[in-house]
Image (tube, rainbow, N blue to C red):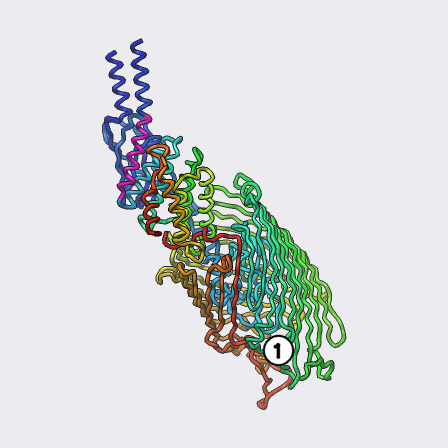
Amino acid sequence: MKQLVVIAAMLAAVVVNAQTKFESAMQRGMGMMKEAKSAVEMQEAAAFFERVAEAEKIQWLPYYYAAFSLYNAAWMDQKTDKDKTGEKCKELISKAEAIEKNADLYCLKQQIAVLQMMVDPMSRWQTYGQEGQQALAAAKQVDPKNPRIYYLEAMTLMNTPEAFGGGKAVAKPLFAKSVELFKTYQPASAMHPNWGKAEAEKMLAQCQ
Amino acid sequence: MKRLLLLSIGVMAATFGWSQVKVMGSLKDTKGRILAGSSVSIKDAYDGGLTDSTGKFKFKTFEKGNQMLVAKSIGYKTQEYPIVVEKDSIVVDFIMKEEISELKAVVITANSFEASDKKKSTVLRPLDIATTAGANADISATIQTLPGAQKVGEQEGLFIRGGSAEESKIIIDGSVVNNFFFSSVPGIAQRGRFSPFLFSGTQFTSGGYSALYGQALSAVLSLESIDLPERSEVQVGISPLFTSVGFQQLGKNKKTSYGASYSYTDLALYQAVVPQAPDFYRRPVFHNMDANFRIKTKRGGMLKFYTYYNASDLALRRPSLDSIGMKNAFALTNFNSFSNVQWRQPLGKGWKMTASAAISYNNDLINSQLQNQQNALVNSTGISVLDAQNFNIRVTNTMWQVRGVLEKKFGAINAVRFGGELWKHTDSNSTRVFSSRFGGTTNETYVAAFAESDLYITNELAFRPGLRMERSDLLNKINIAPRASLSYKLNTNSQFSFDYGIFYQTPERRYFRPWTPEQDFQRADHYILTYQHLSRDYTFRTQLYYKDYAKLLRTDANALEAVSVNGNGFAKGLELFWRDRKTFKGMDYWISYSYLDTRRLYLNYPINAQPTFAATHSGSVVLKKFWVKQMFGVNWSWNWSSGRPYLNPNKPADQFLSDRTIFYSTNNFSLNWLTKIFKSNGVVVAGINNVFNEKQIFGYNYSNRLKDAAGQFIREAVTPPAPRSFFLGVFLSWGVDRSQQNINNNL
């Protein structure tokens, strides 16, 4: 009997351990992202998240972070092939979406669309701009309270020429909405995406 | 119990990773090239690392026992290697095998100019067609700025590498368009009928084109219409030259769309402001209507229907060269329609089907008159060359066609394509001259079967063999045309390709009479060597070619009837193209140059001569600058060519076409401005062609009977109707909220 208890306790330890192992890996990855000073370091974080994702296969978060760090790495080094990064990110996002569809994945989709649009804005804004817009619309349907949706929407408007209905004036209420939503926003866990508050506040200040 | 505890510590050690083992090694490919930034990891575990710039990796693992080490590198086949993790460090060196992939493989169609949204890197962008100065959003005029295309100012059409306009075919969604250009008016080149905004893909192959196409001795321009519009909208275009209205309705499920447009072009105002050399006694008026619907089918298939109608009328008169004080009047009434349906459907298992069908109809009514000073008809002068000016011609061309192509993908990116097509032509014409009427009807049934395959031997080497078989009822003959192209990649951005092919074309049906002796397919053999360097910011391409013509049609001295098929000729040349999007910030430019050496014996040529539509040297410089913040762009183009041959009847036959016109040069300017007008998305376009008022002479018309004091036939230069031409247009669209479709440059 005693032996059985020990075995049970041991197995429980392993199960608990498995959870904490994932969590600690996520923490480690997020640490790598936070401390990344160069595109290479950011890519390392992405590779790490991808490994975690491929090992777990049932968690969408590591896929999300793998794509998100690759996206960040693309902006850190202007020489990055944005199309290649974009395709890779889309692949990761689709794997994440097979597990769960949520607003943060749609937001990331929009960010990837903008990234690919930047390769050739003149001729791509119709296709990729549209793609980004559709992603944000889908995000609003899933979770209209996600403050990052409005931050990204406002950023897009901020960078659109005034002649085309962009500019500070139209972006401002959306930044404000984002900031407002951030006040009550609670991520589902410490591992869930929780970026954007400081950025939105900074942009809102710039619009004043 | 003790044993159990030990066991449990062992399990815990394994799970918590109390001991770590180093795994290291390197990644190279089969050619010994270092693979940096590749990932190596333990399968189904978190442990792993990336290779550094020397291709080495190193990481620690907490896993134990039998594990699988996985090496991944983009463009290479993923490799797995079993390892046993104990205490000692593990060293594994991977040699990665390249995967044949679209991203890395050599481009088979490097001999063509493509503008497409779908492909990542193309030489042209769809937008280029709308923003090339001087082209006024005319597809063929933009193509004239590319190497291989001649700048022929007095006649519409694509004159490619020494070939006449008839020797190039234009295809929309798989169907041949017979009357791509507005009907000919003597001495004035006409525009293409179709707006570049209808198309999302353009592929122009100046020679050595695919076995999927035929009946063009020179070149093929293939246009692909857009699938579904971005969103519903209403469009209005306003210009001193025309007014247009249209709409596009996108279904709620975004799987269907339909639309229609109408435009009315009237040059009355324009001709009042910009005087024209000919006297347009009936101002050019065009009514244009089109409609479309598009349905997205299952598995990414697409069904598209497009229909187009146009009616136009114009009349002009010029002083007669054959009699002082007399005038030649020319009136043209045209009706044209083209309807096309295309169904593209992936069938699964790598199969894809593309079926298309089209019907086209064209009717030209030409009325030519000899008129006196009072612009009244002069019926008879007793001089036959003058009286022959009074004639009426009615030409009707009907064509229907069906086509089917099946494609099967196999291996990584290999493909085989095969299919067939059937064209049926009915051409009838009736001419009345000297109060007698003659004419007739010519029928033609043309069938073709074709097959080709894309074979990638390695990423560096690809081969595309093709075969086409055609039969013409009119000729009662069959031909077999092999095509082949071999491409070799030197490095990431550069490649060579060699294209070869035999191209057949049935002679123009208008030369056929019931008594015409046996005819044959005209033939051209192409040999083309291409070098291309294509990166995101720069494109360099050079082509060297040789074309051999055989069995070209020969006619009687007046070029009216087919006589024999023993014509021949050749064309050889060198072409250069350079495009740079980077060196000057925000500016994009391209330079093209063509050298052409060609001679041919055909139609009514008495000797082998350089044809009137061929200039030895020609080139273009196209500049585009766009300010994203202001949404304002300026475009400049310079097109030039050395003098072209013209027919001088004062010369003996052995000096046929030995005269050359003056050097041709034109500088064109246009600007476009995107802005909000009445809550719509507005585009303002303005342009001037021939900014510097350069003197342009396309050739000479000679009198048939009047001679000057030196005994030479008098002549008149063929020039543009006005030295400069202008364009101004405002295009508005409501519905698409483009503020959302960000155009920014600095996100």
How many numbered callouts?
1
Q: Residue furthest top?
A: A1
- Residue B544 picture quarter: bottom left
Q: Residue furthest bottom?
A: B709
* Badge 1 amino acid: Asp
Where residue B467 appears, as percent x and y from the top left, is 56, 52
Percent across and percent down for residue B480 are 59, 54
Q: Which of these two is toward me, B172 or B99?
A: B172
Chain at tag 1 = B
Q: Secondary structure at mark 1?
A: strand
Q: Residues within 10 Å of mark 1 (few under 14, many from 20)?
A: some
- Whether the magenta-drawn stretch holds residue A27 is answered as yes
Looking at the image, residue A74 sits to the left or right of residue B697; the answer is left
Q: Quadrant of residue A95?
A: top left
Res. B181 visible in picture: yes
Can I make out residue B592 in this image? no
Q: Nearer the viewer, residue B134 or B552?
A: B134
Q: Position of residue B673 (x, y in %)?
A: 46, 63
- Residue matched to label 1: B279
Q: Identify whether B3 is placed above or below B455.
A: above
- Relative height, residue B87 to residue B92 (above, below): above
**Coordinates of residue A176 in the picture (x, y in percent):** 38, 46
> With respect to residue B420, does B364 lie above or below?
below
Q: Quadrant of the N terminus of chain B?
A: top left
Which of these two is toward me, B461 or B14? B14
Residue A33 lies in the magenta stretch: yes
Query: What secondary structure predominates along the stretch shown in magenta?
Result: helix
Point out the stretch of residues depicted in magenta. Answer: A18-36
Query: What residue do we see at 36% from left, 59% from top?
Result: B582
